[in-house]
């Protein structure tokens, strides 16, 4: 197992308007992208952010070697419990998720 | 062909002067820059003020006004003053007139206003013309009057109307990020898909290229597609950097909704023209009636007083969650007892910086050792007076609360005196809806003024 953030080029998150958060996972190569596509489950995203899985939009973007997730913000932007106005820090939580490493799923 | 110069992602973020001159030497037909966003939170819309420094805005805007005069082409700012409310538009107009006076420029200025009146929106709501977008908050007819400011996002049609006045400078209230760039290409019958796609790629300036800080880009539009070129020497656009920009702040990387329809880039083709420029074709604009305008509204949701303290003693650092929960419970009990208020009238948060302040309950690494922890105490209440009172009742706990009754009274570190910082009114976004209108200018006003 390996941390997602250590086996991809970058994990980035940002507001997509005040009510949605979007996270982009940039992979280093086509083979890494295919590995992430098949080993990073949408269910893991739901678990990390405590979401109803049906609210998550997933895009596997082969042309960019990017896997993208969009979902309602954990807290509406600027609401009194929101810890992060711009939504950029949430990427760190996903970057620390453990997935099968690139060597081959052991 | 229509050539659009975008100096940077937002007025206030600065631009590279040499790159701007290079772009001016390419004879653009229009200069367009965004002035705002919801990205910094609801207070700017709630208060109707700009996020950026007035002087930074003035210095950068003066540079663009001189650039405009050099070429005698229109200069457009959209979402003026961060939020695009009438007050923010007036602020931008005042700065513009001040600069014109200092530079001796004679100007025709078109002012497009996006601010909405609550009674109009109540009527629209009752007619079923206000519809929720995905994950919209619940609203009712009272919501509109509760907002201190509501704006509708103008699209290309409203910017076109402003351009048609022949104005030298257009100061627009809230607009979509793309509309200020797409308007002129659409007026000149460039490919509609390319006009919107090129506008989306260009809306953050050089963020679609390798050196985002350089700011300045040129976007060329024609009957088949568009091409994008950053003009700073250090910056280049590649098919990768350009196509990746569709990901940025977009919940869907292929579809972008705009007034009147949507952009679909599923079949777009990105090709390198040379080492610095990218050509894009295959983008599609899909008209979609009825004509809708996105609304943004902010209202006061409480008043805050905050305090900050530090835990450094190892045993307290290691037991901070338990300590904070105990402080919060004891303080809440005393507030209810002494102020005769109910739990629904106030909120006390103790965010443990260095422990779980970023993600709260979702944090997965709470057990890691920290040298010290910051305690960010946030009190929210229905009035400022109540928030202040509660923060002062909280203070002795933050200063002296022991982990156990058996130990000597501890004293924790406070960096400030007074310990409490009054935050004033706190705003929340309360609309994620669209307004259906019969014609594009229905929710906007356009006036032309001269100066100098």
Image (cartoon, rainbow, N blue to C red):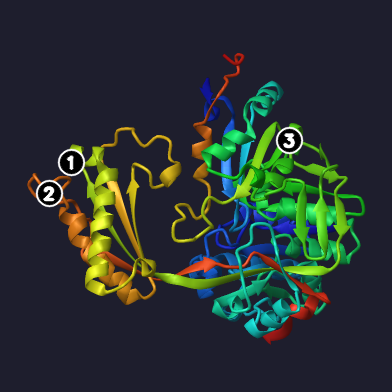
| Viewer-nearest residue: A66 or B429 | B429
**Which image quadrant is residue B294 in?**
bottom right
Element type where label 3 sits in the image: strand
Which mark is drawn over residue B410? 2
| Residue highlighted by disc 1 | B313
Q: Which quadrant of the structure image shows residue B90?
A: bottom right
Q: Which secondary structure lies at badge 2?
A: loop
Say above or below: B152 vs B39.
Answer: below
Cβ–Cβ under 8 Å for marks 2 and 3: no
Reply above or below: B327 against B108: above
Calculate the distance from the C-alpha at mark 2 to the C-alpha at mark 3. 55 Å
* Distance in Å between CA atoms under marks 1 and 2: 9 Å
Q: Is residue B30 left or right of residue A7?
A: right
Give the labeled residue for mark 3.
Answer: A61
Answer left or right for B388 relative to B47.
left
Of residues B97 and B288, the one nearer the viewer is: B288
Q: Residue at x 42, y 44 (%)?
A: B361
Front-lying residue, A42 or B189: A42
Q: Are marks 3 and 1 on the same chain?
A: no
Taking B304 as reference, is A94 above or below it? above
Using the image, name the chain to which the residue with label 1 belongs. Answer: B
**Both marks 2 and 3 on one chain:** no
Determine whether the residue tagged by mark 1 lies in a helix, strand or loop. Answer: loop
Chain identifier of the residue bearing label 2 in the image: B
Q: Residue at x 59, y 28 (%)?
A: A8
Horizontal and vertical percent position of residue B138: 61, 66
Please state, as top left, top right, bottom left or bottom right, where the N terminus of chain B lies in the image: bottom right
Q: Numbered disc 3: what chain? A: A
């Amino acid at each position: 197992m390996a941390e997602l953030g250590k086996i991809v080029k970058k994990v980035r998150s940002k507001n997509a308007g005040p009510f949605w958060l979007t996270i982009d996972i940039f992979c280093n190569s086509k083979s890494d992208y295919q590995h992430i596509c098949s080993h990073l489950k949408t269910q893991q995203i739901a678990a990390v952010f405590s979401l109803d899985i049906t609210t998550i939009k997933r895009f596997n973007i082969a042309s960019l070697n990017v896997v993208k997730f969009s979902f309602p913000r954990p807290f509406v932007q600027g609401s009194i419990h929101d810890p992060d106005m711009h939504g950029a820090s949430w990427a760190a939580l996903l970057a620390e998720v453990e997935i099968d490493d690139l060597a081959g799923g052991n | 062909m229509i050539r659009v110069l975008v100096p940077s992602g937002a007025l206030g973020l600065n631009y590279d002067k040499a790159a701007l001159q290079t772009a001016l030497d390419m004879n653009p037909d229009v200069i367009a820059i965004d002035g705002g966003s919801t990205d910094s939170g609801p207070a700017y819309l709630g208060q109707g003020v700009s996020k950026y420094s007035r002087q930074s805005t003035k210095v950068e805007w003066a540079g663009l006004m001189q650039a405009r005069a050099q070429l005698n082409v229109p200069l457009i700012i959209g979402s003026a003053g961060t939020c695009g409310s009438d007050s923010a538009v007036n602020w931008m107009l005042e700065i513009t007139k001040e600069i014109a006076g200092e530079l001796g420029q004679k100007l025709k200025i078109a002012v497009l206003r996006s601010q909405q009146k609550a009674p109009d929106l109540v009527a629209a709501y009752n007619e079923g013309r206000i519809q929720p977008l995905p994950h919209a908050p619940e609203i009712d007819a009272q919501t509109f009057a509760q907002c201190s400011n509501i704006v509708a996002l103008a699209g290309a049609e409203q910017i076109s109307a402003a351009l048609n006045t022949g104005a030298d400078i257009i100061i627009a209230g809230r607009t979509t990020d793309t509309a200020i760039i797409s308007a002129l290409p659409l007026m000149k019958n460039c490919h509609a898909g390319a006009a919107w796609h090129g506008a989306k790629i260009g809306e953050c300036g050089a963020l679609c290229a390798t050196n985002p800080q350089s700011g300045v880009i040129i976007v060329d539009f024609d009957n088949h597609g568009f091409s994008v070129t950053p003009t700073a020497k250090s910056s280049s656009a590649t098919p990768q950097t350009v196509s990746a920009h569709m990901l940025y702040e977009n919940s869907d990387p292929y579809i972008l909704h705009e007034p009147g329809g949507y952009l679909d880039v599923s079949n777009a083709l990105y090709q390198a023209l040379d080492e610095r420029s990218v050509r894009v074709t295959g983008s599609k604009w899909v008209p979609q009636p009825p004509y809708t305008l996105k609304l943004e509204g902010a209202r006061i949701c409480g008043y805050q007083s905050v305090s900050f303290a530090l835990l450094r003693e190892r045993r307290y650092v290691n037991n901070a969650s338990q300590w904070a929960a105990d402080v919060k419970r004891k303080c809440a009990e005393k507030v209810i007892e002494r102020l005769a208020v109910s739990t629904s009238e106030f909120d006390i948060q103790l965010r443990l910086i260095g422990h779980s302040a970023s993600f709260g309950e979702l944090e997965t690494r709470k057990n890691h050792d920290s040298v010290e922890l910051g305690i960010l105490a946030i009190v929210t209440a229905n009035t400022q007076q109540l928030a202040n009172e509660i923060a002062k009742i909280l203070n002795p706990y933050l200063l002296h609360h022991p982990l156990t009754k058996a130990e000597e009274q501890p004293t924790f570190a406070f960096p400030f005196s007074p310990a409490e910082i009054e935050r004033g009114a706190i705003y929340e976004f309360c609309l994620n809806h669209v307004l259906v209108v019969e014609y594009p200018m229905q929710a906007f006003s356009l006036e032309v003024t001269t100066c100098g």
